Amino acid sequence: MSIRVENLTKIYGSQKAVNDISFEVNSGEIIGFLGPNGAGKTTTMKILTCYIPPSSGKASINGMNVEEKSIEVRRQIGYLPEHNPLYMDMYVKEFLQFVASTYQLSNITQKVKEMIDITGLGIEQNKKISQLSKGYRQRVGLAQAMIHNPSVLILDEPTSGLDPNQIVEIRNLIKTIGKDKTVMLSTHIMQEVEAMCNRVIIINKGIIVANGNPSELKSHLNNRIQVSVTFSKSIPPTLVTELQKLGDIMSENGDTFVIESALEENTLKEQLFQFAVQNQLFIHELKLMENTLEDLFKNVTNP
Amino acid sequence: MYSIFLKEVRSFLSSLIAIIVIVVFLIANGLFLWVFKETNILDNGYANIDPLFELAPVIFIFLISAITMRSFSEEKKTGTFETLTTKPISDMGIIMGKFFAALTIVVLAILPTLLYYYTVHKLSVPVGNIDTGALIGSYIGLLLLSAGYISIGLFSSIITDNQIVSFILSMFLCFFIFTVFDFLGSFEWLKNNNFFVEWLGINYHYKNISRGVVDTRDILYFVSLIVLFVWLTKIKLNSRKW
């Protein structure tokens, strides 16, 4: 078990930022940590990286409690804080050398060179950090988080504020280096989770509201299915009433109807077909609407 | 600790702070000791560099505050404080790294003044007729005083993320502890306690050591002062966990 969190609670003043959450992350997993702003994602990550202690409950990394073995835990995790703070007046190499020296690594020069190669910082390696674009700064942030080859990576919004190309690059980078590591990343972008993560944990108001494989979670969203059906011509209101017997009409756009039904997928399709035949209509298009992770997110974070 | 120390010294040197501090210190001292009429060593008639040790504590109130003002304020403002405190370094390691880095810059500023000693040594009649013992004491005193100022500066830096506030607070605290107790000591209504009040200030102990009498009580005073402010800094650094 790489990360284990048990009944973790963090209280700021009178506000509960994290309320009695528990979860586990196995080694080798890439998990996405989702939630609206202020849900407690960053707080949880700060506790896991020993920046702040929990008010109650336990958190451990590789079996070591974050409070009792703080220094040892810090050695085993790589952390990219929110907003990626860096020393702007340092040179890229100088900064990476400094970070490497805080971990007391041997052959620092070689490690720095390795990280520059992996993160693709080659052409920018002799610049000051303040001269870099946001995408390259993000790479520096990732490089400093991974320079000591940690077994657990904790990344707080690693792709925020990047352009679409940079997002794809950073994503691929995390995927490549995350192969033999445990990665926990927070994000607001749902596609990112679907593209990278084996598992997603959704947190809302300090409570975990969903935890599981993205596709599994989506299928369990509800047991009603939605189909979109397009007929050959618009149908009179009397027939619309008849159509409603099959399920609720969610939207109506000319001859296209979105129907949500509690029926089985195939039963619904057959009945729609029969309905069309009886009323001398043709079905131009019939498709099953899949639940997206966005739907799941909306569903569990808006009570 | 060593990695923090190196990083700090490098950043002092590359951000010109160190250079400016050293240059300003040497120019100010040079003018007062060798050029200005009133305080001139050459017209003084005595083979010593005492004016240096009267002047340096005052100049250091400004310069050391300038060195230490950014040490924690900037880290807090830019968020690198979080990067730093999630690395495997103890809180004390961070403080001591910054402390010794600042002390190194101060030592670099003081070192060239050994030339003054050499000059006076050569100018004295007969050559070499200079009170070396008092001089060594004076340098030890100056170093202890600088270390005290630095610990005050670090404390001022950690309680705010605004460098200006930190600078002003540090100057005020250094000034207060250096000299205000002396003034208080001369007040009538403190007549019975004025020795104790003077004893609280830096100046009393600094003057003692400057005479060449390195008394353990004075050393202990400086060490306690440093320990007190370093300890306060550590408490504040730890307060993120409250």
Image: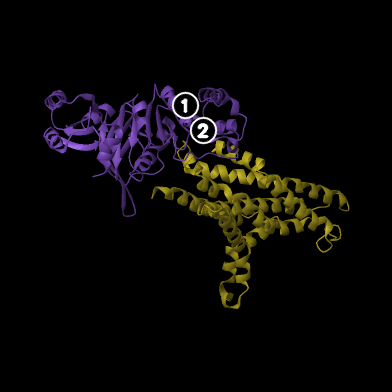
Residue A216 position, x and y percent, is 24, 27
* Whether labels 1 and 2 share one chain: yes
Question: For chain A, what colour was chosen?
Answer: purple
What amino acid is at disc 2? Gly
What amino acid is at disc 1? Glu
- Residue at disc 1, secondary structure: helix
Pick whichever, A121 or B136, lies toward us.
Answer: A121
Instruction: Report the residue at 62% width, 54% height from top.
Output: B65
Query: Does residue B71 sit above or below A135 in this rendering?
Result: below
- Residue at disc 2, secondary structure: helix
Query: Which chain gets the yellow colouring?
Result: B
Residue A279 position, x and y percent, is 13, 28
Residue A93 position, x and y percent, is 59, 30
Instruction: Report the residue at 63% width, 59% height from top.
Output: B205
**Disc number at residue A135?**
2
Q: Which residue is mark 1?
A: A169
Sequence-earlier tag: 1 or 2: 2
| Inter-mark Cα distance, 1 to 2 | 9 Å
Q: Position of B68 compared to A273: left or right?
A: right
Residue A48 position, x and y percent, is 37, 37
Pick whichever, A299 or B149, lies toward us.
Answer: A299
Q: Position of A281 compared to A177: left or right?
A: left
Q: Position of A140 compared to B33: left or right?
A: left
Which of the 4 image quadrants contains residue B187?
A: bottom right
Query: Does residue A129 sit above or below B191 in this rendering?
Result: above
